Amino acid sequence: MAANALLAKLTGGTLSSLGGLAGAANQMPCWTGAGVMATTALTAAARGLLDDGDVATMRATPGLGDAATKTVTGSSTDTTAGRVVKVGDFGLGNASLIVTDFDAITATGLYRNNAAATGAPESGTLFWNVLHIGHNADATAATQIVTRAAGTAKNQVHVSRKSPGVWAPWSAVCHQDSAVGTVSQASGVITGAMIERGANANGHYVSALPTARSSAGASWRQAAARRRHGLSRRSSLSCPPSMEPPRQRCFRPSASTRCRRRLRHLQRPRWLGPPCRYMPHVRHRALVLTEEAMIITLSPMRRDDRLELSVAGAVLTLNGSAIDLAGYDHAAAPNRWIAEQPSQEGGEWRVTVILPFGPLPPDHDPDAPAIRAVLFPEPVTVTEDGPVDLPALPTPVAQEAEGGI
């Protein structure tokens, strides 16, 4: 019987298929079908793996690192230690992750809401981008920074932090789009701009909310109360507002002079003591009234002609020629008395004007105050409309240079 089985195998085509192969270098036999064999390439790289004694050596031969033995994350918020992160996990490298509850976020990453979400800075609003930064593994401390992606014409930025385990109220970040505008606040929370500037029947005014220290104090007290009562950062909490109504000071311009004025809001440190007795309504603050001036920088130049200068608002009159600084283009149509393009900073016009001066005598004293006032003039601050006094050489010096005396 055994002889018959061996004979069947020898005559079944397997051995004849193998015997029909032509051996060649770097080739090995393989099955291509039932009872059919052929040869395939056996490369040097393949032989290098075949002669390795274990799996670790086989991984080392092609240069595979530790990632070859790691598991890929199972979800977009899988925080299992040691797993390989995919593109899109935690909102990285692709669109941020959609959430409906900002307070429930625990994994560090980028998120957004396409529908009304719990814990948003403004209830019922959409399209917030959220950067969530976890501070520890148990998710009891974290920071969130949110920006408005759509739904408003201005940039909105808010920040909040969780510690320990309770989110503090959102704090609006003040920037160039939100610092100046219409001031408003509700129950101690800033809902509009911090500074408002305008004019009414009483004159020009500046209205400002209290300093950030008062707002921070309110936020700290409310957050502490929420932690004591185990409330979320969006729970209703009845606390007396620590912020006072916006302060507004109006100033009527003088009838004799056309002055432009502004307010500078300065912080008064506690160590300076009680407020000034002349301003009893200001507590730890000082409202300083200053002229909104035109700053004229003088550029001395040896010239025989003279300059007569006057100011009326933003209009300079140079030897009878009126120049409106608001529409002046130095590059397109330069004036020979203006050295460069005027600029406006904080309501103040700044302009550089040529200051002509005549010949100096050979034996003049360069350190004489009258000479230095012309050669090294100080900027002129103009606070009233009318002629501007310019420094000039003393009459005896000018006459001596011209040979008069």
Image: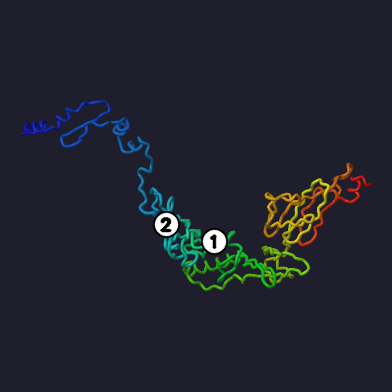
Residue 167 position within the rendered picture, expressed as x and y whole percent measured from the top left: 49, 64
The number of callouts visible is: 2
Q: Nearer the viewer, mark 1 or mark 2?
A: 1
Would residue 61 be found to the left or right of residue 397 on screen?
Answer: left
Label 1: element kind? loop
Identify the residue at the far right of this view.
Answer: 405
| Residue at the image position 29 percent from the left and 33 percent from the top | 50
Foreground: 308 or 80? 308
Q: Amino acid at mark 2?
A: Leu
Marks 1/2: CA–CA distance: 24 Å
190 horizontally vs 51: left or right: right
- Position of residue 231 measured from the top left corner of the image (x, y, whole percent): 47, 69
> Any mark on residue 97, and which?
2
Of the numbered discs 1 and 2, the one sitting upstream in the chain is: 2
Q: Which residue is mark 1?
A: 154
In the figure, 384 relative to 26: above or below? below
- Tell me: residue 220, above or below residue 404: below
In front of the other: 360 or 37: 360
The residue under label 1 is which amino acid type? Lys
Residue at the spot 22% in from the left edge and 33% down from the top edge:
30
Horizontal relation, residue 148 to residue 274: left or right: left
Give the camera-side residue of 300 and 52: 300
| Quarter placement of the N terminus | top left
